[in-house]
Image: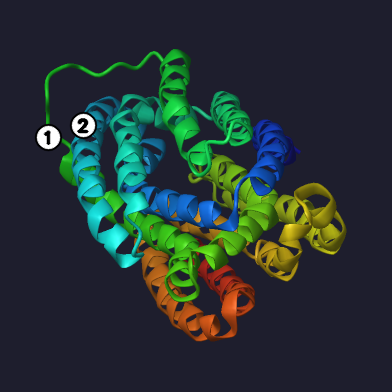
């Protein structure tokens, strides 16, 4: 009886965290939908394409900030946290400063690659956000460690909703691609302020490298996975933009955001809530296993009906909400949307591996999957944007369930 009470209590905590993240995601999606509608009506596909390249470059650079340092703080033993937090702060700053320089320098070859000098200035300006992030990273990780995901949810809601609303306003005002870029510069300090007000931790001013070895050793596998995830998330944009042109990229970028936007918010929420939920039960194998499987059932009950409903309704709501000029994007949108179904299950299996100190296995899998995905996209682009979207769906549908099953079997076979 005690075991079931404990399971019920922890499931309620997971559901509560997921609920707060879900509410936050819902508000974000509503404001994002409004912004997407306005952007679709006021921006041309060419402007969408230029913005897509700028945001893709920034996303690929920013992934190096997600080095697994925060994950190490979430996963660390209580007696290690104080020292690791101080080390993490200075390591985050070192990484961010380096990335700022790299993004500015990268703007020039990227503009040459896409044969468009308009990309140089916005790519350099977006790099400024990299200098703000270290102020709040440690606090964010400690809040997640303490399972206070309501604070994380509120921060996300305020940050991204403000971003979306500002993008809407700037689009109407005729800012073109800058309507997508400028809001992100404005909301970055807002996120830092929220993190600092929600946690009392502050860094000591003395620079230290002590503990960097621990953070880097653990983080390199997590970073590798994040890098590969981010590369896969943007690889289709890079291929479409390079081989099919900026206008085709604008159409594809719209379809991806309109199709996967809602589902992706839920997927991110699930991933954020699951790791501390699992780590808290590592000492009790039975409870650990029950938490994992019950979480998978919750994920299935949420994500599958939502994705199927959105896919079926796409032919009706796209021309009404976004305008008839985006009708061509509907088949792409449906295919991308359906690819969301296996994603949260594979993400959950990844969090399971991290919880049992096996991030390297997740890394090996992601290397293999990225190679397969890249080869498939190069083949799929021969059939234009629809071929790329079909490739995304097919590859995710075949390989992600295989990984989920094998990772789950590995962990619970090793822990039995």
Instruction: Tell me which residue sits at (46%, 33%) in the image.
Output: 182
Left or right of residue 340, residue 141 in this image: left
Q: Nearest the camera: 102 or 402?
A: 102
Left or right of residue 362, residue 269 in this image: right
- Name the secondary structure under disc 1: loop
Residue 244 in view, yes or no: yes
Left or right of residue 353, residue 13 in this image: right
Instruction: Tell me which residue sits at (16%, 45%) in the image.
Output: 213
Kindly identify which residue carries mark 1. 209
Q: In the rendered view, tell whether residue 53 sits above or below residue 368.
A: above
How many angstroms separate mark 2 from mark 1 (CA)?
Answer: 6 Å
Q: In the rendered view, tell whether residue 227 sits above or below residue 393.
A: above
Kindly identify which residue carries mark 2. 87
In x, y percent, where is residue 82? 28, 24
Q: Nearest the camera: 214 or 37?
A: 37
Residue 293 in view, yes or no: no
Q: Nearest the camera: 12 or 87?
A: 87
- Name the secondary structure under disc 2: helix
In x, y percent, where is residue 33? 71, 42
Left or right of residue 35, residue 349 in this image: left
Give neighbour class at mark 2: few <14, some 14-19, many 20+ (Cα, 10 Å): many
In x, y percent, where is residue 314? 81, 60
Mark 2 and 1 residues: CB-CB less than 8 Å, in contact?
yes
Instruction: Tell me which residue sits at (32%, 37%) in the image.
Output: 125
Sequence-first tag of 2 and 1: 2
Quadrant (top left, top right, bottom left, bottom right) of the N terminus = top right
């Amino acid at each position: 009886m005690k075991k079931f009470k404990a399971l019920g209590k922890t499931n309620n905590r997971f559901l509560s965290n997921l609920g707060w993240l879900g509410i936050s995601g819902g508000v974000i999606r509503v404001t994002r939908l409004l912004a997407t509608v306005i952007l679709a009506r006021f921006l041309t596909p060419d402007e969408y394409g230029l913005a897509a390249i700028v945001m893709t470059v920034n996303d690929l650079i920013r992934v190096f900030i997600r080095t697994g340092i925060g994950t190490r703080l979430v996963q660390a033993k209580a007696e290690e946290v104080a020292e690791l937090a101080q080390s993490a702060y200075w390591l985050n700053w070192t990484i961010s400063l380096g990335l700022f320089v790299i993004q500015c320098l990268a703007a020039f070859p990227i503009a040459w690659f896409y044969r468009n000098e308009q990309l140089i200035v916005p790519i350099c300006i977006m790099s400024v956000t990299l200098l703000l992030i270290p102020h709040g990273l440690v606090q964010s990780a400690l809040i997640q460690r303490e399972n206070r995901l309501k604070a994380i949810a509120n921060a996300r809601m305020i940050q991204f909703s403000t971003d979306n609303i500002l993008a809407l306003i700037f689009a109407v005002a005729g800012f073109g691609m800058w309507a997508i870029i400028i809001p992100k510069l404005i909301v970055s300090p807002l996120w830092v302020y929220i993190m600092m007000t929600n946690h009392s931790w502050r860094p000591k001013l003395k620079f230290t490298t002590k503990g960097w070895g621990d953070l880097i050793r653990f983080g390199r596998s997590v970073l590798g996975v994040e890098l590969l995830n981010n590369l896969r998330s943007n690889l289709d944009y890079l291929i479409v933009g390079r081989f099919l042109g900026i206008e085709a990229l604008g159409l594809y970028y719209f379809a991806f955001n309109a199709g996967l936007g809602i589902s992706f918010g839920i997927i991110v929420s699930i991933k954020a809530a699951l790791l501390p939920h699992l780590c808290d039960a590592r000492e009790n194998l039975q409870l650990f296993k029950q938490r994992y499987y019950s979480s998978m059932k919750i994920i299935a009950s949420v994500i599958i009906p939502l994705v199927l409903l959105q896919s079926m309704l796409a032919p009706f709501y796209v021309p009404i909400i976004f305008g008839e000029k985006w009708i061509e994007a509907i088949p792409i949108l449906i295919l991308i949307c359906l690819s969301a179904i296996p994603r949260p299950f594979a993400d959950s299996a990844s969090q399971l591996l991290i919880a049992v100190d096996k991030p390297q296995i997740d890394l090996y899998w992601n290397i293999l999957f990225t190679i397969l995905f890249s080869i498939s996209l190069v083949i799929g682009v021969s059939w234009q944007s629809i071929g790329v979207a079909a490739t995304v769906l097919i590859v995710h549908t075949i390989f992600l369930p295989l990984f989920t099953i094998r990772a789950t079997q590995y962990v619970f076979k090793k822990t039995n």
